[in-house]
Each structure stands twice: as structure tokens, then as C-alpha cells.
Image: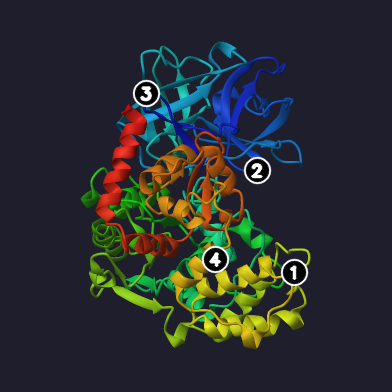
């Protein structure tokens, strides 16, 4: 999905608009309409602006690109007024052009939703945008477009992609424009057009893609590769064969079992890594990047219909994301979710859903709502849906898995059936050697030296992949001489290993006014998407009564502390930071709670944030 931004008026607009196409006149001088990219070589537009079987197109949102020739390879019926173009070149789309997300909701499900489109009114080569509200559904899969007072559409918008804010995607093609308002044919109708498989691939539901998921770089990709953050190179995931085979078969089977498959285990045992391996290897682009020696189980290509990282999310937010991926009506109330999904998925195409970090939802109450109102109804009432959820056994309200009642089948990664000592040793070895991100002078580059150390780390890690990874990574990063395996001792306790690792970090300010652990503790209070550097500074001041320059925190975040942080956003002023693993959040908050009440800290943070916003 293209990233979206929110305008001052509250409209969610597409941030990436490289997919916008201008369809030019026969002499190539003037735009006669618009179109949009649907894959690496094809464009969708209106048939009535394609006067011949060869047209010229331009990509106005990508600087420096000349006009190109395109061939009309398919036309819709008279009621559809659609045409598929293919660039007349083997090179594909110009560099920098990215296809947008496409959704195929029913026309009646779009009524009342806000829309946005970019066209070329009056042949203006610079183009302009328009927006408004989708009115009533019309015949043959069309919808009426009602416009905002200052954003009317005119001739030159024909062929423009219809961006729908609730879906964060294109849902139709503006096909009639003039007099201010207009009409559009929906992709729900357009998917029947020959050659438009990009809208609905065979035997799959369109919508979610790994590349379009904002959590791909923050969660799915690094967890799948066995590294802390996405910027770190390497593919260190190893083994987990039994669990992965069970999940793959769960998604393949067509038996009407109507239960949720729950992947559970203690903190650090690798729940997210296993699920992320499934989510990422289902993506063809990721599969092509896997190392030649990667022999771990992979998901079937294209088998994931939607993946949701539930940290900080409400049940309604999780339901809405799944609905968007299925091109279902986006629910405003949770109780509508099952009916909307059942109506959207009547075709019976498989729709496989992964929900990870259930125990990290916005609250324990929301986690149980996700179980009761999202996961179980989806599995129980939509025959083509298969649901896999990752969760700890318990949360702050106690037994979490019990909320599934009889509606679950469990993979417990702590059980012998799903744990192989060789997997943990192989992961420790890859991490000790910093495979994929090798360090010059690493004494463990020699496998003969590294293997006994990796074996010792695995033996002492109490089956915990997080502990093994942190210990192995610490030695791989900092040792100048190989450690004696027989002399290597450490506690298998996650808290102790984390704090031993934190002690190596240089504090964010000289003089040690606040320790690295103290600075990171402030981030433990952050909810998604995290704190900006100024907010982080304010939080440190509230908790530790120390003033820290936000720029110093930004530098700290680029130091070895980056191994514990997830950094989001490209704008320096809006860049956010949060801790990379819930186990670190739990550990830092527990240590803080030993001498300061959580409620007192939260009151202090609230006062500090309000003061920084409104003034004293």
C-alpha cells in the first residue's frame, strides 16, 4: 500500500503518487486524460481517451522521464469504458515508479467514503487534484462522485485512479467528468476485464502486500531474518521445521475446522520469528533474496491475505486492516466485522490471516476483543478464512489463551515437539559470526572456532532464542579474542542478559547524568509508533529530572543503542523511536517499578507532555 498522509482537512491522501500517468494527445503535446500503473508494465485508463491502438503516456510525478509509447492490449465493454495499456518496451516502468495498492470493494460498500483523484483538467500538463465523497452506487459497478466545493472535476480527469481514504488504495477509475461532479467505474467491476489480473490474482484475495505494510521494515523483515533491526544485514533464521510445517499445512488445508491456530510460548522463544518467516517467504520478492543455503521451511508463494502486527492496536483497528485487505466494507463497529467479511469472501478464494503480538495490543481488554470479535468470528463464520495468531500465554489480566476457549489449536514453541537444540545452536552460530553483516577482525569468523562457543551459548540459553541471540551478538560485536567455551557463563534469564548488554552502551550524554538503560526506559512507556526525539527528551526529563538535548538522543539512537531501537519515518523532525522487543519493554518497566510506582511515572509523563505542548 502506498503510504498515506493526512491533510489539514483530515483527508488521507496518497503520499507516493509515482503511479500517476498522463495519457497524451496523438502529437504527444497535451494530456487528454489520465491513467495509473497497475504492475511493472501495464497501465489502466479509460477506453474513450484511447483513440487508436497506440498511445503516448508520460509519468509526471517522476522527474526527467520522457513520453513513452504504449499499446492498448485490452478494452472493456461499453459499460466499463476501460482499457489496459502495456508499455512498448522490454524495460518496464521507469525507475521510481511504484504501482499503488488496489482494492475491489463492492460499489455499495463505498457509499459515503471520501475520495481523491489526480487528473489533467483542460489538458493542463501540470495537472490538478480533486476530492469529495462517493455518492450512491450506480448500475454496472459504477459510483457517483460528489465533489467538494473547490475541488470539482472537469474533462481531463477521465482515466484517473480513484483513491479511497478508508482503504488507503485505488478502488476505481474516474470515467465521466464534467460539470463539477463525475462518475467512476469500480475495480470490483473492472476485475472482469481481460488482462486485469493485477486487481485480483487467480485463487487469491487482493489487498495486503508485504511491501505495502508499514510494519514490514519495523517488524516482519527483521524478525524473519533473525536480526534486531531491518538496517542490519544478514539472514540468520534457522530451523523451526515442525512449527513452520504445521502453519503451512494449516493454510493449505480446505477442511472446515473453524478454529484459530495459536502460536505461543514464553518471551524470547521465537513466536514472532516463526510467524514473520511465514509472512515474508510468502512474498515472491523476499523469496528471491533468500541465500542459497537457506533451507528452512517456506510458505507457499502468495498464501498470505493479510498480516497484522497488533502491538498498540485496538480490536477495531485490527478488524479494519483485515477488512481493507479483503476489499470488504471497513467496519465502524466491531459487531459488523464478521458480516462484512463473509459478504466480501463469498467467492471462496483462500484468505489466510496472521495476527502477531496479540498480547501487545492497546490493552489487555483490547487483546480479548481481538480474540472474541475478530479472530474467532473470522475463523468460525468465513469458511475460506484461516487464522493464525501469535501470543504469550498470559498478560496483565491473566490467562490470555483461555479467551479462545475451545476455538483454538495450539503450537507451543516451548514444548519438545516444536524445539530442536540444533536450531538454537545454528542460530547462535550465525549470530556469533554476524552472518550477512560480518565484522573485520571477528575472532569467530573461523567456523571451527565459533562452533564450540555457539554450542555452549545454546546449552546455557534455556531454549530461549532471544537470550542466545543477545549473548552471541555481544561476543560477535565486541570480542577481539575468542572466549573459552568452558569458561563462558551467563544467566539464561532474559532480564539479566538484557541488562548485561545495556551496560556496554555509552550513555547519551557525557558525564553519565542518565544511563543508557535510563534513556531506554523512557521509551518503554511509548506506544506505537513511538516517541520523536523531543518527546523522548521530555520523557527522560519527567522520569529522571535530567535535561537531554534531542540531538544527543538522535546520535545515541545511531550508536550501538540502535540494536535495541526501531526507528520510523524519513522526516528528521517526525522520526520516531521505540524499543525493538516487548521483552525489553517488560524488563525495563519491571526494574523501574522496583523503586517507582508505575502510576506516579505515568502522571509525571502526562504533566510533562501537557506542559511541553501548552506551556507551564
Foreground tag (4 vs 2): 4
Res. 40 mark: 2
Foreground tag (3 vs 4): 4
Residue 338 pos. (x, y %): 27, 55
Displayed quadrant of residue 183: top left
- Viewer-proximal residue, 19 or 502? 502
Q: Residue at x 28, y 64 (%)?
A: 376
Q: Which of marks 4 and 1 is nearer the N terminus?
A: 1
Q: Label 2, label 3: how many angstroms apart (C-alpha)? A: 33 Å
Residue 205 pos. (x, y %): 45, 54
Displayed quadrant of residue 400: bottom left
Residue 615 pos. (x, y %): 33, 27
Label 3 crowd bin: few (<14), some (14–19), many (20+), radius 10 Å:
few
Q: Which residue is drawn at 55% across and 11% down?
A: 122
Q: Is residue 201 visible?
A: no
Image quarter of the C terminus = top left
Residue carrying label 3: 9
Residue carrying label 1: 442
Q: Label 4, label 1: how many angstroms apart (C-alpha)? A: 18 Å
Q: Is residue 307 left or right of residue 395?
A: right
Label 4 crowd bin: few (<14), some (14–19), many (20+), radius 10 Å:
some
Label 1 crowd bin: few (<14), some (14–19), many (20+), radius 10 Å:
some
Q: Which of marks 2 and 3 is nearer the N terminus?
A: 3
Residue carrying label 4: 501
Q: Earlier in the sequence, mark 2 or mark 1?
A: 2
Q: What element carries label 4?
A: helix
Residue farthest along the left direction in this orientation: 335
Res. 594 mark: none
- Viewer-proximal residue, 98 or 475? 475
Q: Label 3, label 4: how many angstroms apart (C-alpha)? A: 46 Å
Foreground tag (3 vs 1): 1
Residue 437 pos. (x, y %): 70, 62
Amino acid at each position: 500500500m502506498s503510504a498515506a498522509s493526512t491533510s489539514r482537512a483530515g483527508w488521507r491522501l496518497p503520499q507516493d503518487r509515482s503511479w500517476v500517468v498522463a495519457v497524451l494527445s496523438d502529437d504527444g503535446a497535451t494530456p487528454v486524460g489520465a491513467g495509473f500503473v497497475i504492475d511493472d508494465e501495464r497501465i489502466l485508463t479509460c477506453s474513450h481517451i484511447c483513440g487508436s491502438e497506440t498511445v503516448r503516456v508520460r509519468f509526471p510525478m517522476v522527474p526527467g522521464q520522457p513520453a513513452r509509447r504504449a499499446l492498448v492490449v485490452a478494452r472493456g465493454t461499453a459499460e466499463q469504458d476501460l482499457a489496459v495499456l502495456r508499455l512498448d518496451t522490454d524495460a518496464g516502468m521507469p525507475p521510481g515508479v511504484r504501482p499503488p495498492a488496489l482494492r475491489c470493494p463492492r460499489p455499495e460498500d463505498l457509499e459515503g467514503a471520501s475520495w481523491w483523484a489526480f487528473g489533467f483538467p483542460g489538458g493542463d500538463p501540470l495537472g490538478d487534484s480533486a476530492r469529495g465523497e462517493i455518492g450512491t452506487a450506480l448500475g454496472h459497478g459504477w459510483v457517483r462522485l460528489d465533489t467538494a466545493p473547490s475541488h470539482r472535476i472537469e474533462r481531463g480527469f477521465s482515466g484517473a485512479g480513484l483513491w479511497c481514504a478508508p482503504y488507503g488504495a485505488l478502488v476505481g477509475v474516474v470515467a465521466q467528468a464534467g460539470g463539477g461532479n463525475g462518475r467512476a467505474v469500480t475495480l470490483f467491476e473492472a476485475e472482469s476485464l481481460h488482462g486485469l489480473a493485477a486487481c485480483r490474482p487467480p485463487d487469491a484475495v487482493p489487498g495486503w502486500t508485504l511491501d505495502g505494510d508499514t510494519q514490514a521494515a519495523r517488524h516482519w523483515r527483521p524478525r524473519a531474518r533473525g536480526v534486531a533491526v531491518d538496517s542490519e544485514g544478514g539472514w540468520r533464521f534457522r530451523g523451526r521445521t515442525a512449527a513452520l510445517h504445521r502453519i503451512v499445512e494449516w493454510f493449505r488445508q480446505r477442511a472446515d475446522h473453524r478454529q484459530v491456530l495459536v502460536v505461543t510460548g514464553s518471551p524470547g522463544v521465537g513466536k514472532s520469528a516463526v510467524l514473520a518467516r511465514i509472512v515474508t517467504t510468502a512474498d515472491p520478492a523476499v523469496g528471491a533474496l533468500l541465500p542459497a543455503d537457506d533451507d528452512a521451511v517456506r510458505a507457499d508463494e502468495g498464501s498470505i491475505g493479510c498480516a497484522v502486527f497488533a502491538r498498540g492496536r485496538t480490536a477495531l483497528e485490527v478488524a479494519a486492516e483485515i477488512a481493507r485487505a479483503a476489499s470488504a466494507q471497513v467496519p465502524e463497529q466491531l459487531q459488523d466485522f464478521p458480516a462484512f467479511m463473509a459478504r466480501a469472501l463469498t467467492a471462496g478464494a483462500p484468505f489466510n490471516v496472521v495476527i502477531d503480538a496479540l498480547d501487545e495490543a492497546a490493552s489487555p481488554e483490547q487483546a480479548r476483543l481481538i480474540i472474541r470479535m475478530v479472530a474467532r468470528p473470522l475463523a468460525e463464520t468465513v469458511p475460506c478464512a484461516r487464522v493464525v495468531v501469535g501470543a504469550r500465554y498470559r498478560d496483565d489480566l491473566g490467562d490470555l489463551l483461555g479467551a479462545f476457549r475451545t476455538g483454538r489449536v495450539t503450537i507451543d514453541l516451548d514444548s519438545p515437539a516444536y524445539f530442536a537444540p540444533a536450531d538454537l545452536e545454528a542460530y547462535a552460530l550465525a549470530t556469533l559470526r554476524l552472518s550477512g553483516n560480518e565484522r573485520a577482525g571477528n575472532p569467530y569468523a573461523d567456523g571451527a572456532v565459533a562452533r564450540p562457543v555457539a554450542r555452549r551459548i545454546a546449552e546455557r540459553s534455556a531454549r530461549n532464542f532471544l537470550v542466545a541471540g543477545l549473548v552471541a551478538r555481544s561476543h560477535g560485536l565486541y570480542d577481539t579474542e575468542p572466549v573459552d567455551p568452558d569458561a563462558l557463563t551467563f544467566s539464561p534469564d532474559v532480564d539479566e542478559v538484557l541488562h548485561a548488554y545495556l551496560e556496554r552502551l555509552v550513555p547519551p550524554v557525557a558525564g553519565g547524568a542518565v544511563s543508557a538503560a535510563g534513556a531506554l526506559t523512557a521509551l518503554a512507556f511509548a506506544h506505537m509508533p513511538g516517541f520523536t526525539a523531543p518527546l523522548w527528551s521530555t520523557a527522560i526529563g519527567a522520569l529522571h529530572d535530567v535535561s537531554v538535548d534531542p540531538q544527543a538522543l538522535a546520535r545515541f539512537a545511531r550508536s550501538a543503542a540502535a540494536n535495541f531501537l526501531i526507528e520510523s519515518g524519513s522526516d528528521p523532525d517526525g522520526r520516531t523511536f521505540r524499543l525493538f522487543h516487548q521483552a525489553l519493554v517488560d524488563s525495563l518497566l519491571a526494574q523501574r517499578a522496583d523503586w517507582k510506582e508505575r502510576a506516579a511515572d505515568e502522571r509525571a509523563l502526562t504533566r510533562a507532555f501537557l506542559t511541553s505542548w501548552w506551556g507551564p
